[in-house]
Image (cartoon, grey):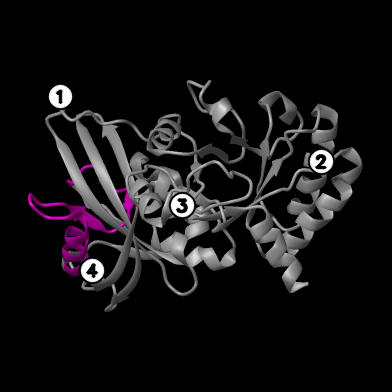
Amino acid sequence: MPSTVPDSGLPDRVEVALGVLQDASGRVLVARRGDGQHLAGLWEFPGGKVEPGESPAAALARELREELGVEVAAATPCLAIQHVYPGRAVMLRVFRVTRWSGSPHGRDGQPLEWRDARQLDPGQFPAANRPILNALRLPERYLITPEPADPAAIPAVVDAVAAALRAGMAGMVQVRAPGLERPAYREFLAAVASAAEELSVPVLANAPVAWLEGFTEVGLHLPERRWRRLDARPEVEGWVGASVHDGAGLARVAELGLDFAVLGPVQATATHPGTPPLGWERFAALVRECAIPVYALGGMDPGSLAAARAGGAQGIAAIRGLLGAAAGQG
């Protein structure tokens, strides 16, 4: 779980710039820490300490040149992870390296491996790396279900969601239906979960935890009114995410140890007509200081994905923007 690092009282506070490099097949580059180093023997993402007066981006470019023999051409800041180890505090400035030149090799003799990003074992990495590992496993598109008007409308909504998933429009789905009572909501959740299971798509329930009884692999999505009442991460097996609207919300859900956040609205949207949009510049500024992956919400569709990723986001979250795109492909 990310830990808040105070600005004083810890004698050894280190700022580190890390780069996430992936090849054309999606494998990620990792290096093993050498003997005599802090956390020796564990695997990590390449990078190193930020020197006094040096920006994290400059430190990343320098470290990857020195460690790997590569030149960074483009890198996007996407996480800022604060963590306290016994006797040591770190701030990890994490970049998604999207373009580089040269063939990575361990210039200091450190072992390097390209590994399947979905198969990385958290036990082989420093505890502070957990949000990076989550980011590598989470998809770019997060579909939120439209709400059935009544229980009789559930099958039609499920059919639309299933069609979107089959079309590859989303890699994760949130079942949201605040107007349904518990029995009807559980019927809706079961139907969406059945359709998603065939495609190995994770499902999150936007409902009270008690309503998830029997859904052992379903995760949980928390609206603000629910996560504000928590003092610890809910005990569920799947992903746990939250909806937030500002930097304070992002900081709080990270402190709770949640896996990701959905931040918005980024652009004007009919579902929040009275809420001023953040805009991409403000969104990117908030994301680069957040310790967990963040999805952009509000006016999103597949065409928004490039802007979201350029702003450091994990990806996009949407209802009509993803369902409509699926219908357009039909």
Rounded to the nearest angstrom, the CA distance separating label 2 from label 4 is 50 Å
Nearest-to-viewer mark from 2 and 4: 2
Q: Earlier in the sequence, mark 3 or mark 4?
A: 4
Residue that carries the numbered disc 2 in the rendered image:
188
Residue that carries the numbered disc 3 in the rendered image:
135
Q: Please determine whether, in this image, residue 100 is positioned above or below residue 280.
A: below
Q: Badges 1 and 3: C-beta atoms under 8 Å apart? A: no
Q: Which residues are magenta?
A: 36-65
Q: Is residue 169 left or right of residue 44?
A: right
Nearest-to-viewer mark from 1 and 4: 1
Residue that carries the numbered disc 1 in the rendered image:
9
* Residue 97: mark in rendering: none
Q: Is residue 136 left or right of residue 7?
A: right
- Magenta-span inclusion, residue 47: yes
Rounded to the nearest angstrom, the CA distance separating label 3 from label 2 is 28 Å
Which residue sits furthest front? 274
Q: Badges 3 and 2: C-beta atoms under 8 Å apart? A: no
Q: Earlier in the sequence, mark 3 or mark 2?
A: 3
